[in-house]
Amino acid sequence: MCGIFGIITNQDNISIGKVVLEGIRRLEYRGYDSCGIVSLSNSKLYIKKDSGKIEEIQKKIDLADIPSNSKLALAHTRWATHGKPTRINSHPHTDCSNKIAVVHNGIIDNFIELREELTQEGHIFKSETDTEIIPHLIENKLKEGLNLKDSVVEALKLCKGAYGLAVCHVDNPDLIIVVRKESPLVIGIEEGKTTYLASDIPAFLPLTRKCYIMEDDELAVLKAGEAEFYDIKNDKKIDKELQIIEWNINAAEKGGYEHFMLKEIFEEPSALKNTMKISEQLLSKFANALLSADNIYITAAGTSYHAALAGKFIISRFLGKHIQDIECSELETQLKGSLQNNSVIIAISQSGETIDTIEAIRWAKKTKNVIILTITNVVGSSITRYSDHVIVTNAGPEIGVAATKTYSTQVLALALIAVSIAKIRNIISDEEIIKYYEALNGIPSIIEKFLEKNVDLIKYIVNNLEKNLNYFFLARGISIATAKEGGLKLKEVACRFIEGYSAASAKHGPISLVREGFPIIFIAPPDETYNRLVGNVMEFKARGGRIISVVVESDEKITKLSDITIRIPQPADEYHNLFSPITFMPALQLLAYYAALANDLDPDKPLNLSKTVTVH
Ligand code: F6R
């Protein structure tokens, strides 16, 4: 996820530099590892870009460097996906002649092939990004004699993937071309005077409340104070309705959601779709490293550790080897004296900056010949420096302190590695592999359906539980990870001591807490542990426990024993069960979110916590 902002005006009293910097700053929540601006004046592009937070870059950009007679500018804030967050990789990107500038949000899936072809034709690339192919493709089309608009259309026909993009050209100083496909774009208008473009409404909300929302496969030609829209598939003009935005800026930044945490839970389906795009080649690098290792460890902290527990379970199904999970803060102490050469450590950290995780892998690398396989959400983060191979989950920036979408995408990345191992080992049939992929591909829509229909039920459960300061999440098998993560979310954001625990172990002690009405939330997908879990539910019910269960839609047995059920709309088969840590988790995340609200707490800023933990 990145942020785009742009302006084209005929007004003399506007400081273009100030407006674009202010506009892009309001999109910083969409990405903050680098930033760039292009303005156009006297048939020349003026580009300023660098890595770092917008605030730091703003200090470096002298407004005098942006020509005062410039009437057009584009800006970009980046969240790196292809290429590290460096100055060269920052947007805007240009063509060989330095006449075309492009800012882009999204991913061009086939950029490697296109880049190879363009390089063979003689185009020179400066960055490692997928975006840079776009100005070069447009350059080619212009050379064929097409105008700028048609060149953009024809260039994009060659690109597979997602884009919200804006293009300017020195020979067309009075227009900007923007196109949307699966990456948001909105156009703000001050009629007859100024037109703005942005990835999100807050960027121009203080300047105008009038806007057009672009849909997929639409192109807009923007001129000062006017916008024309076209259907990119047939070049037909579209009449769009001008909308008046009533939100305040705060609500707008969160896309209309009250908090980032809620927004990020609702972003899980699209984040997971992005994670599904991890290349088969990279997955098989992870798979082969695990297959040739003598010893395998998986390490992380907090929520990432819970993803590790779920992932370890899924990978072990197909790997035929044991994986030992160790909290990163304990790795050195536990493995001192026993770490061997030819070991592999899977390290998971959404931020890539957690000091305990980094120190654990640095120690292991220093001590023996080990391979580090890392899963992170941040390209170029510190952890990647000590890693042999890196998977980036591409969940987009997560602003809420409590990890939500980064958790589900971590588990998905691990699940993809697992299926890759199954394929390489040839231990299950092709039909079964297809079924696992179908189950994986279906996860986003299962979560979408769940979120669409269950918010009121979760609010009802929160009200129902409100008087209880303590309760349990209990589960067996793979769902113990889900129970633990659910407990952590409630501790973090709702400040309640809610424990996630093994349902089998609970009778060896914790069951003594149960009194009439004591709530227990059972996580109960219909997997091989289900029948035993039914027994556990009965034990707790017999002692007066109030049973709330998270089950699949067709569930009967545990539903009959429960006071309330949360139903996850997924099929009851072994393929979906294996990925239930992903599909069952949003229910518990929502529970934590609404429990925080019920306790008058800000779920985005839990007490005593920070998003990146760089202390021991
Ligand atoms: C919980 C949470 C933390 C992190 C932990 C590790 O919601 O966010 O428990 O999971 O601090 O952080 P990363 O994944 O950045 O290493």
Image: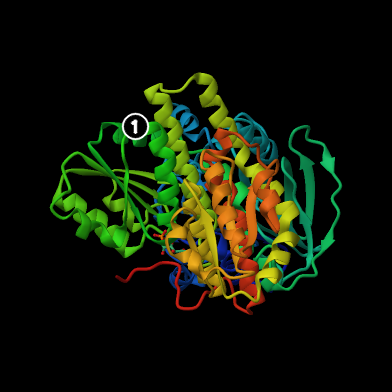
Of 252 and 418, the residue lying toward us: 418
x, y (%) of residue 106? 57, 46
Which residue is labeled 1 in the image? 320
Residue for point 53% across, 36% down: 109
x, y (%) of residue 99? 54, 46
x, y (%) of residue 218? 74, 43
Residue for point 84% across, 50% down: 240
Amino acid on which disc 1 is placed: Gly
Say above or below: 60 vs 481: below
| Label 1 crowd bin: few (<14), some (14–19), many (20+), radius 10 Å | few
Could you say which quadrant of the image residue 316 lies in? top left
Give the secondary structure at mark 1. loop
Residue 494 visible within the image? yes
Q: Is residue 56 left or right of residue 299?
A: right
Q: Is residue 352 left or right of residue 80?
A: left
Q: How many labels does the image show?
A: 1
